[in-house]
Amino acid sequence: MTKPSALFILSPAISRLPRKQAKGYMVTSNPFSAMFGRSPFRPLLAHIVKANECADLLLPFFEATLVGDWDTAGELRENVTRLEHDADTLKTELRLNLPNTMFLPVSRSDLLDLISVQDKIANKVRDITGIMLGRKMRVPNELAEPMRDYMRTSVACVAQARQALEELKDLLESGFGRNVSDVMQNMIRELHTLEHQADSQQVAIRRQLFELESQLPPVDVIFLYKIIEWVGEVSDRAERVGSRLQILTAR
């Protein structure tokens, strides 16, 4: 008796189909494929964990730049780059291994869109640390505390997006209950609140920087505005993850 060339990972009903009929539901032996199991949210969650870990390094990196500790900043930047690369690898593997024939609980295109949005979080943290380290940028003392709070809020947005995805994965794998929508709506509402807080902090910091412009080299001012903008994009992209999760639960 020959051994089967692949394992069925779908429902028992599918596994009982004749081999010829079931052929379209078979998957490769790629270890990444096993992560899907009965839910494609496992690799999505693995990806946003990497993005979250990447964002978590933003604040210690900023603290190192404030005191001019460029060795520590360089080490943290290397960690950011490694995590961003890991996230890219997970993104690529998900795109290659998400079968068209799998019975997914949500739209395949929605999943691919979600992974793209998540990936931009890690990309933006990489950009922030790269330009600050490359130029050895030090934020003026007057802006240090507001920028610290601003970054803390942006990182909290990413953590909230990760938590929302964890919750959705559990809900989808256990089957939708009556309170699923309420749970998700509350989590996404909190994410919106955090992102709005980050927007308000960005406005205030821009106003403070405007008042300091005459005391700083013009080129430094340009790049400071760019960093302020990019920190805001981290929270904005985390909020977009929440918006897409909201769409998924509404369908």
Image (tube, rainbow, N blue to C red):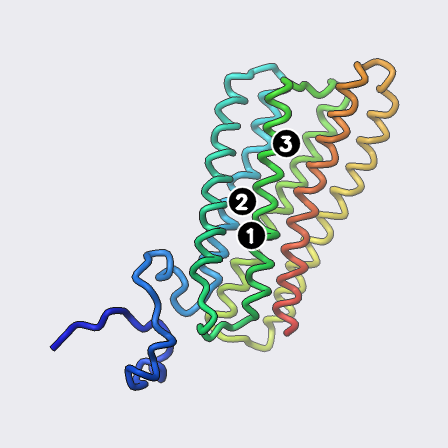
Q: Say which label, 3 or 2, has the lower sequence index.
A: 2
Classify mark 1: helix, strand or loop. Answer: helix
Quadrant where the C terminus sits is bottom right
Residue shown at 29%/86% (left/top)?
18
Q: Is residue 42 above or below residue 10?
A: above
Q: In the rendered image, which quarter is residue 32 located in? A: bottom left
Q: Say which label, 1 or 2, has the lower sequence index.
A: 2
Side of 25 where 6 appears, left or right: left
Q: Closest to the observer: 231 or 115? A: 115
Instruction: Tell me the tag on residue 162.
Output: 1
Q: How many marks?
A: 3
Question: Label 2 amino acid?
Answer: Ala
Residue shown at 57%/39% (left/top)?
55
Question: Label 3 amino acid?
Answer: Ile
Residue shown at 52%/68% (left/top)?
171
The label nearer to you, 1 versus 3, is: 3
Real-space Cα separation, disc 1 to disc 2, in angstroms: 9 Å
Real-space Cα separation, disc 1 to disc 3, in angstroms: 21 Å
Whether the residues at callouts 3 and 2 have beta carbons within 8 Å, the answer is: no
Label 2 belongs to which residue? 51
Whether the residues at callouts 1 and 2 have beta carbons within 8 Å, the answer is: yes
Question: Label 1 amino acid?
Answer: Arg
Label 3 belongs to which residue? 128
Furthest residue in direction front, as rendered: 20
| Residue 184 x/y as whole percent | 62, 64
- Badge 2: few (under 14), some or many (20 or more) residues near its Cα, within 10 Å? many
Q: Say which label, 1 or 3, has the lower sequence index.
A: 3
Real-space Cα separation, disc 3 to disc 2, in angstroms: 14 Å
